[in-house]
Amino acid sequence: QVQLEESGGGLVQAGGSLRLSCAASGSIFSISEMGWYRQAPGKQRELVAIIDSDGGMNLADSVKGRFTISRDNAKNTVYLQMNSLKPEDTAVYYCKVHWYNGRATSWGQGTQVTVSS
């Protein structure tokens, strides 16, 4: 069984910062891509940022220059540093991990990020 434990969400004022963490554990191996997605009320889930095993990254245009994604392969953990937060960043943020050389995908349970104006 695979567990993805997310942490770091919360309520912050516009312009503030939060750091999300997602630690994978259990019967997980050969992790390739790790990433973050978000879903705001009434909207579809969208990609925020992904990072592959070699450190290659892709970020949504809406967060470039404000968010940074990183990973610690020794800890099977991916991070999302979010700076200069805006009210439109309010959403549930989900961690997603591809493992077993891309044959398997797991999602975290989601963590709420609320940015007040």
Image (spheres, rainbow, N blue to C red):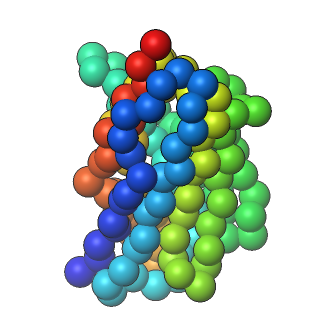
Q: Residue at x 44, y 63 (%)?
A: 22
**Image quadrant where one finds the N terminus:** bottom left
Q: Residue at x 57, y 32 (%)?
A: 16
- Residue 17: x and y in percent read 57, 38
- Residue 7: x and y in percent read 38, 57
Asked if residue 96 can be seen in this view, the reply is no
Q: Residue at x 72, y 52 (%)?
A: 57
- Residue 98: x and y in percent read 47, 65
Q: Residue at x 56, y 58 (%)?
A: 79
Whether residue 5 sits left or right of residue 116 in the image: it is left
- Residue 109: x and y in percent read 26, 54
Q: Quadrant of residue 2?
A: bottom left
Whether residue 71 sits left or right of residue 101 in the image: it is right
Whether residue 79 sits left or right of residue 92 in the image: it is right
Asked if residue 92 can be seen in this view, the reply is yes
Q: Is residue 5 above or below residue 15?
A: below
Q: Is residue 16 above or below residue 95?
A: above
Residue placed farthest to the top in the image?
Answer: 117
